[in-house]
Amino acid sequence: MGLRVILPYLLVCYLFFYYKWAEGYVKLSKEEDLELEEQLKRLNKPSVKTIKTKYGELYDCVDFYKQPAFDHPLLKNHNFHPEGLIHGFKGYIKLSKEEDLELEEQLKRLNKPSVKTIKTKYGELYDCVDFYKQPAFNHPLLKNHNFHPEMRSASIPKRGGGCPIGTVPIRRTTKDDLIRAKFHSEMYASKLNPLIKEQPGTRFALARTKLNIDYDGVGADISVWNIPVNSSQYTAGRIKISNGAESLEAGWMVNPDLYGDGRTHMYIFTNAGQSPCFNAQCGYVHLRPDMPVDGIIDPVSSYGGNTFVLTLAIYQDVVKKDWFLKMTKDHTDIGFWPSKIFTNLGNTANQTEWGGEVFSPLGVPAPGMGSGHELEEDTTKDAIFANANIVVNNTIVNPPRDLKLLVDSFKYDVRNEGNVGDGINYLIIYGGVGGGTGS
């Protein structure tokens, strides 16, 4: 948090130190005026929040990495990292030389040469990387793969025109992104089972199938929301399919520590073997040149107004046993997880679920879930999974009416509405206002 510097203040300082508080006024030269403007740009960084004290002072809440200290020429290539990005504690983390070198190696593996770079209207950078050089193929079990997917041109217009045929959009990764992603992947994987005291801070509201049959897929039209969260918090709505400790998720998430902003992003989570990860960093093979898996979702739903949905499904190729991520109403394949990266899911899944999840450090009021409001039995106000479905024996069917409902906080709720028709078909609703603390 830094005190906002205003032009009059700089002018006063300038006059005091250089003109000994001369009477009258001093007319700055054009060069001097430009220099002051440059100083203002360096000092007043973009803020996520501004606080005004009772004395009228303005303090801008500035990203740790953008504070004025790092304008110092000797700190340009620093490796300091705030613990606030990880557990919500104050201070910073200093990486060891070995850890820093490992991150540099990871950056080389992740940021491949691109044939084109697309900058979104939100400032995100996506590199159009050759299909065969995407991060998925860094996975040791995919080194000698023989995947040769049919390359298709962009069918949905996107800002920047999408990537060329034969390439896929991969979000540009920085060292800070890696640190955040590593921590959150490890933390997220450790918090997949709700209702246990060993995972304080995580809240769930889930509708889950029973463990008595094999499932070939799960899907739904997921309403997308943007719920305010603070640093070290997240809120999400997702579908999930699993077998034992291995699982795949897809949905939307607001997670400032993971993405570096407070916007709603699409996400996938891969929990396979010893290296769980978000998005395209470990074993997920992306196919589409026009649809990234971690992009900002806009517009989002408004309470009592328009509802915007993200149509997602995770289905298994019952012949090759690979798991495909499908998107849009026509179930377009946008990527897949090769079966060889799994142990349990390499064969089949034995559980599916739909629901919301939030996280907040102990003692900090938890954020809202879903729409951020109590359930109203109104699809314009509740967070919904419309057209919820499962795949059994390679056939898309409705979920069973005896879904197990799991809620681990009185602040949240989930309801299995069943087949309501009206184009919504099978409906599951969830959400809550948040505000709870403790385990």
Image: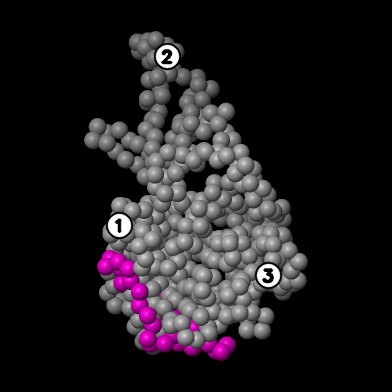
In-image side of 23 versus 334 (left or right)? left
Image coords of residue 66 (percent x, y): 49, 39
Image coords of residue 62 (percent x, y): 42, 40
Earlier in the chain: of badge 2 and badge 1, it is: 2
User: What residue is at 28 percent from the left and 59 percent from the top?
Assistant: 436
Image coords of residue 429 (percent x, y): 35, 76
Disc 2 versus disc 1: distance between alpha carbons? 53 Å
Residue 208 lies in quadrant: bottom left
Residue 400 part of the magenta-drawn span: yes
User: What residue is at 69 percent from the left and 72 percent from the top?
Assistant: 152
Which mark is drawn over residue 255?
Answer: none
Q: Quick one: which residue is furthest to the front in this view? A: 198
In the image, which residues are magenta?
385-413
Q: Which residue is labeled 3 in the image? A: 153
Relative to 68, residue 243 above or below: below
In-image side of 234 versus 294 (left or right)? left
Image coords of residue 382 (percent x, y): 33, 72
Q: Residues within 10 Å of mark 3 (few under 14, many from 20)?
A: some
Which mark is drawn over residue 438?
Answer: 1
Residue 195 part of the magenta-drawn span: no
Which mark is drawn over residue 17?
Answer: 2
> Which quadrant does the N terminus fall into?
top left
**Towards the viewer: 257 or 93:** 93
